[in-house]
């Protein structure tokens, strides 16, 4: 009987009724991305997705940095699942890929060793009086945008096509390590052929850039950045990626991890200041987008409402290529309508 190997690289993704867990670092780095995702799910796709005001960090960064112990993180995860259980949801959607990795790890551990699951129930009940059930389906938000990518395409005002040349825009996709490398079977395409972001780019008219360091780590690595003396390792990882993708002249980078998006964006500024080097021909850098921002732009969302002015590498040149309508005078206008003070310009990186 013929074996269909590609089926092994798929994953089950629920159709509706999701409990959403926000990310601690996403709200710091790209605060508009989560609001954009919720708006896409609710208003563009008509899905039921619950955003609890009682949620909290998964402690993943502390856990992977050996600061927060296993038992504490396990209890924190259990409380987050109790919020899902309390609201009657069974499909769990953690915003951060580190949260996604942490949740997946504990679910796997609990299935393999039920006695540890009972310990988690005991710890949570003693600490909070709460109980929980395991999710029936746990997926990352990028999985959902991927799942509904063709439905979203029908609603999009723009495509990933250079309006000046008529050619597909060239995109670098970067997959967070905690999405597909820790538990490969839980990522679309597994660790070998991750397709969650490439599928979006291709569906929306773009061209995926393949380059030698495509699967190389962005450099975050927690200990590489949290310990100041180690940050040279972090920037060296990102620099290796930039040097590898530079000859292919990508128009943008899209990532599904908040840390990856932040470092691939901010390290471009840092390298420009340190070495007077940018990785595009004009000196503006390569714009780095979250997958929500990418989808939102094509749907016609205002880039400033999504918070894209918070990126270090500015996005106007990409917006112009796509043909996105935007008001440059609103870039630094606050929610009150008052213009905020514009940030200082970098010494080297053009804005």
Image (cartoon, grey):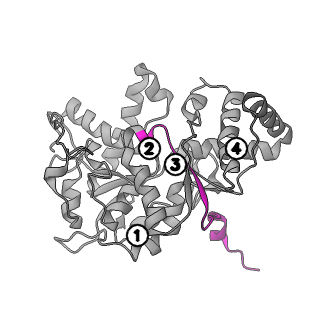
Of helix, strand and loop, which one carries label 2? helix
Give above or below for 312 relative to 142: above
Give above or below for 238 relative to 48: above
Image point 46% across, 74% down: which residue?
150
Q: Which residue is mark 2?
A: 258
Image point 45% across, 21% down: which residue?
227
Disc 4 to disc 3: CB gap under 8 Å: no
Q: Is residue 212 visible?
A: no
Q: Which residues are magenta?
A: 1-27
| Residue 95 disc label | 3
Disc 1 to disc 4: CB gap under 8 Å: no
State how many labels appear.
4
Q: In terms of sequence position, does the residue under pointer 3 or pointer 2 come before the other?
A: 3
Q: Quadrant of residue 140?
A: bottom right
Image point 26% across, 35% down: which residue?
271
For the residues labelled 1 and 2, the Cα–Cα distance comes to: 22 Å
Q: Is residue 17 magenta?
A: yes
Q: Position of residue 43 (x, y in %)?
A: 44, 66
206 or 115: which is nearer to us? Answer: 115
Give above or below for 274 relative to 174: above
Q: In terms of sequence position, does the residue under pointer 4 or pointer 2 come before the other?
A: 4
Dot in front, 3 or 2: 3
Q: Position of residue 128 (x, y in %)?
A: 72, 31
Q: Quadrant of residue 325?
A: bottom left
């Amino acid at each position: 009987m013929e074996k269909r190997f590609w089926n092994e690289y798929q994953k089950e993704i629920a159709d509706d009724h999701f409990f959403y867990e926000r990310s601690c670092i996403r709200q710091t780095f790209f605060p508009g991305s989560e609001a954009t995702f919720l708006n896409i799910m609710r208003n563009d796709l008509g899905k039921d997705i619950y955003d609890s005001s009682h949620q909290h960090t998964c402690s993943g960064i502390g856990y992977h940095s050996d600061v927060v112990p296993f038992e504490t993180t396990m209890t924190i995860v259990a409380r987050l699942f109790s919020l899902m259980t309390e609201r009657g949801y069974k499909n769990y959607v953690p915003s951060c890929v580190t949260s996604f990795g942490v949740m997946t790890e504990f679910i796997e551990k609990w299935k393999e060793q039920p006695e540890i699951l009972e310990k988690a129930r005991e710890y949570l009940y003693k600490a909070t009086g709460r109980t929980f059930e395991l999710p029936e389906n746990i997926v990352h938000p990028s999985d959902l945008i991927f799942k509904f990518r063709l439905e979203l395409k029908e609603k999009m005002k723009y495509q990933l096509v250079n309006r000046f040349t008529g050619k597909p825009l060239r995109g670098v996709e970067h997959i967070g390590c905690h999405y597909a490398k820790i538990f490969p079977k839980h990522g679309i395409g597994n660790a070998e052929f991750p397709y969650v972001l490439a599928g979006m780019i291709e569906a929306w008219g773009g061209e995926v850039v393949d380059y030698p360091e495509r699967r190389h780590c962005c450099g975050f690595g927690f200990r590489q950045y949290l310990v100041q003396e180690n940050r040279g390792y972090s920037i060296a990882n990102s620099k290796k990626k930039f040097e590898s993708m530079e000859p292919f002249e990508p128009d943008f980078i899209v990532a599904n991890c908040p840390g990856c998006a932040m470092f691939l964006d901010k390290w471009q500024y840092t390298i420009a200041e340190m070495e007077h080097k940018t990785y595009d021909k004009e000196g503006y850098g390569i714009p780095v987008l979250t997958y929500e921002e990418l989808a939102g732009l094509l749907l016609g969302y205002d880039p400033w409402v999504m918070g894209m002015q918070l990126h270090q590498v500015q996005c106007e040149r990409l917006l112009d290529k796509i043909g996105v309508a935007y008001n440059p005078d609103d870039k630094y206008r606050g929610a009150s309508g008052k213009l905020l003070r514009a940030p200082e310009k970098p010494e080297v990186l053009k804005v």
